[in-house]
Image (spheres, coloured by chain):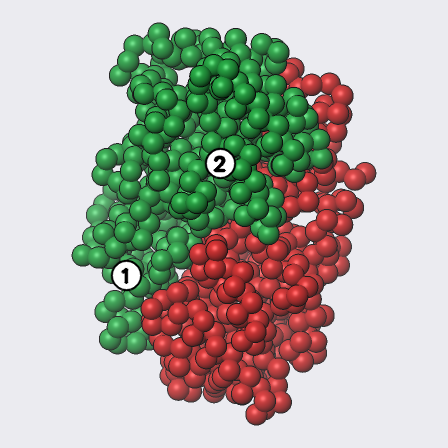
Chain colours: A red, B green
C-alpha cells in the first residue's frame, strides 16, 4: 500500500480502551473531528487515519499501528511530522515507537545525499571509526578557534565540528569565525594531504540562514551542523536536499531531550535520532553517548545506531555520532559497541592543554586504530 | 543587571547535589567544558552561566536560578532558547519553570506587535471573550472551506482560524484555499459591516514560506497561524516582527506536547505557552483547554493565561486561546475561569450540521454575552 504507518505505544488498561485510543489518534492526526461527523467518500476512505494493528506489549501498554494517506502529509517534512505526531504529542501516554514511510513518502523524502559511503569518500577514511573533535568554548576569538581547528587536523581529525553553542557571539561572529576556521583547516589539510571536513554550526535569524549557508560553503566548509529541535526538521531537509550547496549535514540534539526522556510520551530514541533524521536527509546524527553526562542507556544508544545504519532505510544508511563518554581508555569498548561506521565526538577532554590539542586527538586516533575491529 | 535569568526545577537528594547540578547547567548551557578548563577573563567572568539562587521546593526538588550573558545568546531567538535549555533539555530531572529576560534581552525581543489591545482594535470586539471557529477537516475543497468560513462570519466569529492540519493537501492547496477563504470572509464582512480576521495555517517547504506569507497577506489574511514546535520559534519571531507583513500571529502547540507532559523534564506550561511566546512576538497562544480531549489541568491553563496576560511582560500582554472543551453549556464556566481577554477556539462541535455553522457560532456568541462578566 502507499500509505505510511506510525507505530504508537499506548497506555491503556484494556484492549477496548487501547482500541479507542488508537482510533482517537487516527482522528486526531487527520480530520480532528468526532468520527460521526467525518464526511463520507474521500475524507473517510482516504484521509482518515486507519488502525491497522493492535497488540499488547505489557500489562497496560499497547502497540498500535495507524496508517495515513500521503495526501494528508503533502510533500513537506513539516506536515509529514505534523500528521505523525502533531496533536497526539500533547496527549499523555502516547509515544511514537516506529515509522514506516511506505513507498510514496520514501519517494518524497529520498534521504541522505552522502550517508556512510559518501562521508568515507569525502574524508578519505575508508575503514575504522571517524573522530570529530569539537571547537569550544564560546567566548574565544576566531583566531583561537582557527588554532584549535588546525591542531585537530594535525592530530588526525576526520571532521572538525563546532560546538552547537557557537552562534553570533560578539567575540566570534559567524562569518569571521567560519572564514578563519575554514582557512586554517584548508591550510592544514594542504600541508598534510588530508581531507578533514569542517562543520560550522548554523546560526542566525531565519532571514540570514540562506546567506549564512552560502557563505559557509563558499568559505570552504565541508559540511554543516544544524539543530532540528530549534530550527525544525523542515529546514534540515531543505539544506540536505540542496544540490547546489551539496554539503553533508550533521544534526545536534539540542532542545530535543523532552521527546525521548519520559518513556510514556514523545518519540523513541531510534525513531527520533535515526529514522526521522534519515527522512530529513541527515548524514550524521549526534546523540548523547552512554557513560557521558547524559543518561542514555547502552540499549538506547544501540537502538539509535541501528536505526541510523539499517540497510532497510529509509534512504541510505547514515552515521550515528555518540557525543561524550569517549576517551583513550574507553576506545576499545566504544569500538566494540558501535563498530566502525560511527563518528565519535571528542569534547572538553581535549582541552586540558589547548596548545597540544593535536597530541590529544592523535592519541585518540591511535587508541581507536589499536582497538580490535568488529 | 543586564544578564537574563532562567529558573530550573532540579531533582536532587541533597543541597550539595542540587548545587552541583545547577553549576553543571551553568557550564552545560554555555562553555560546555569542565569548570577547571574554562579560560579566565571574559569567558569565566561574562560568558559562563552563574548560579544566582538555590532553594528547596520539596523533599528532593530544588529551584535554581542561573543567569547568562546576552553575549552568549546573540540577537536571534533560536540561540537564546539554545542557551536557556539546549543541552540541559536532554538531562533527566531538569525543567525550566521561569524566565526573566532582563532589560537587554527584552530590548532585543520586544514582543507582540498587536497583543490584546491590538487584536481588540482589529476585530472591533472592544469587550468580552473572542471566539474563533476552526476550519476543518482536511480533505475538503477550497469552496467547502470558503462556505464554512462565510458561515462563521455570519455567526459572529472574531477570528476564523484554519485547523493546523490544513497544509498542501491536493484537495485544497495552500494558495487556492487561502484565496477562496479570504474572499469569502471579506465578502461576508463587507455585507455585515464586521471585521472578522482570517488566520490561515502557514505551511510549505522552507523555501516556500516567505512567498506563502506574502501571498496570504496579499490575498487578505488578517493574521497567520504558525506551529513553533515544527517550524521553530525563530521563524515565529521573524513573522511577528515583520513590519511590512504587519499580521498578528497565532501559534498552535502541535508537536510541543512532550515539553510539558512529564513534570520532571521540559518547560512548564506558563513559560512555554506564555513567556516564550511573548518573547517571540506572538499575539495569540493556542493551548489545549481543561476538560477537552487533552489532559491539561485547570491550574496549568490558569498558569498559561497568567503568563500570557501579566502586565509584567515580556512585551505587551497577549491573548491566551484555550482549544477544546468549550460549549454553550460551559460558556459561563469558561468566562468565569478566563475572564474577557481570551480567544475561545470552537472545533468539531460546530460541524454537527456544516450548512448551519452560522447558527452554532451565533449560539456560542450569545452564551458568552449572557455569561456573567469577570
Which residue is tagged 1? B69
Is A21 drawn above or below residue A69 in the view shown? Answer: above
As drawn, the residue found furthest toward the right would be A1
Chain for disc number 1: B
At x 61% / y 41%, what residue is drawn?
A79
* Spot occupied by residue A240 in the image (x, y as percentages of width and height): 63, 60
Residue A249 x/y as whole percent: 60, 64
Residue A302 visible from this viewpoint: no
> At 26% across and 34% down in the image, what residue appears?
B310
The image quadrant that residue B314 belongs to is top left
> Eyeballing the image, is A268 above or below A200?
above
The chain identifier of the residue carrying mark 2 reads: B
Q: Nearer the viewer, residue A104 or B236?
A: B236
User: Which of the two discs, 1 and 2, labels the residue nearer the N terminus?
Assistant: 1
Quadrant of the rendering where the C terminus of chain B is positioned? top left
Q: Secondary structure at mark 2?
A: strand
Density class for disc 2 (Cα within 10 Å; few <14, some 14-19, many ≥20) is: many
Please give the residue where the numbered disc 2 appears in the rendered image: B224
Is any part of residue B170 visible from this angle?
Answer: yes
Amino acid at each position: 500500500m502507499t500509505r505510511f504507518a506510525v507505530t504508537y505505544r499506548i497506555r491503556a488498561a484494556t484492549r477496548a480502551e487501547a482500541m479507542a485510543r488508537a482510533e482517537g489518534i487516527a482522528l486526531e492526526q487527520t480530520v480532528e473531528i468526532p468520527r460521526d461527523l467525518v464526511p463520507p467518500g474521500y475524507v473517510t476512505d482516504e484521509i482518515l487515519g486507519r488502525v491497522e494493528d493492535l497488540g499488547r506489549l505489557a500489562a497496560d501498554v499497547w502497540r498500535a499501528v495507524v496508517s495515513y494517506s500521503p495526501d494528508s502529509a503533502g510533500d513537506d517534512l513539516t506536515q509529514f511530522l505534523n500528521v505523525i505526531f502533531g496533536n497526539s504529542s500533547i496527549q499523555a501516554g502516547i509515544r511514537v515507537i516506529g515509522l514506516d514511510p511506505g513507498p510514496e513518502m520514501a519517494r518524497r523524502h529520498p534521504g541522505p545525499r552522502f550517508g556512510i559511503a559518501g562521508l568515507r569518500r569525502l574524508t578519505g577514511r575508508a575503514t575504522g571509526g571517524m573522530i570529530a573533535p569539537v571547537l569550544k568554548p564560546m567566548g574565544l576569538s576566531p583566531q583561537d578557534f582557527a588554532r584549535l581547528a588546525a591542531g585537530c587536523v594535525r592530530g588526525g581529525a576526520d571532521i572538525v565540528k563546532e560546538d552547537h553553542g557557537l552562534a553570533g557571539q560578539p567575540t566570534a561572529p559567524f562569518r569571521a569565525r567560519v572564514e578563519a576556521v575554514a582557512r586554517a583547516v584548508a591550510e592544514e589539510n594542504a600541508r598534510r594531504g588530508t581531507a578533514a571536513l569542517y562543520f560550522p554550526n548554523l546560526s542566525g535569524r531565519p532571514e540570514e540562514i540562506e546567506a549564512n549557508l552560502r557563505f559557509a560553503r563558499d568559505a570552504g566548509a565541508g559540511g554543516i551542523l544544524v539543530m532540528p529541535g530549534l530550527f525544525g526538521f523542515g529546514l534540515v531537509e531543505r539544506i540536505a536536499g540542496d544540490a547546489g550547496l551539496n554539503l553533508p549535514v550533521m544534526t545536534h540534539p539540542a532542545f530535543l531531550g523532552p521527546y525521548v526522556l519520559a518513556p510514556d510520551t514523545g518519540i523513541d530514541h531510534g525513531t527520533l535520532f535515526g529514522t526521522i533524521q534519515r527522512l530529513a536527509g541527515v548524514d550524521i546524527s549526534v546523540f548523547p553517548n552512554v557513560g557521558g553526562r547524559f543518561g542514555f542507556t547502552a540499549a538506547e544508544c544501540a537502538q539509535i545506531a541501528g536505526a541510523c545504519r539499517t540497510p532497510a532505510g529509509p534512504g541510505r544508511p547514515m552515521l550515528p555520532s555518540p557525543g561524550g563518554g569517549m576517551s583513550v581508555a574507553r576506545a576499545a569498548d566504544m569500538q566494540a559497541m558501535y563498530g566502525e561506521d560511527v563518528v565519535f565526538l571528542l569534547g572538553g577532554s581535549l582541552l586540558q592543554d589547548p596548545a597540544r590539542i593535536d597530541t590529544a586527538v592523535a592519541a585518540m586516533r591511535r587508541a581507536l586504530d589499536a582497538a580490535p575491529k568488529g
